[in-house]
Amino acid sequence: MPAKRKTTKKKRSKRKGATPTNPSLYARVKAEAKRKFKVYPSAYANGWLVRTYKKRGGGYR
């Protein structure tokens, strides 16, 4: 019978979402989204937020 290998658990780094490259622009657009939509956060409002942020020159890393 072959010897059993020890299994080691690899530590996984916490993966957060994409971070905006221009936080001040992102904050302005997010505030506008909160005023524009009755329900925030929602999928529709977040989609609008990402589209508008990118349209105004923002990006993600």
Image (tube, rainbow, N blue to C red):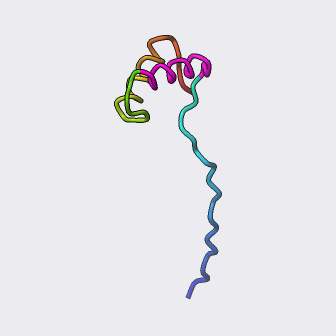
- In the displayed image of the protein, which residue is found farthest to the bottom? 1
Snapshot quadrant of residue 48: top left
Q: Residue 60 at x, y = what percent? A: 54, 25
Above or below for 27 versus 1: above
Q: Residue 29 at x, y = what percent? A: 50, 19
Q: Is the magenta stretch mostly helix, strand or loop?
A: helix
**In front: 8, or 59?**
59
Taking the image as shown, residue 4 lies to the left or right of residue 29, namely: right
Q: Does the magenta stretch include residue 10?
A: no
**In front: 8, or 3?**
8
Quarter of the figure with the C terminus: top right
Above or below for 15 versus 54: below
Residue placed at 51% from the left, 11% from the top? 57
Q: Residue 58 at x, y = what percent? A: 53, 16
- In the displayed image of the protein, which residue is found farthest to the top? 56
Taking the image as shown, residue 48 lies to the left or right of residue 19, namely: left
Q: Does the magenta stretch include residue 26?
A: yes
Q: Residue 14 at x, y = what percent? A: 61, 48
Residue placed at 34% from the left, 30% from the top? 44
Snapshot quadrant of residue 33: top left
**In front: 51, or 1?**
51
Quarter of the figure with the N terminus: bottom right
**In front: 9, or 60?**
60
Which stretch is magenta?
Answer: 21-35
Residue placed at 55% from the left, 18% from the top? 28
Residue placed at 44% from the left, 22% from the top? 35
Count of all numbered marks drawn on residues in the image? 0
Above or below for 2 versus 26: below
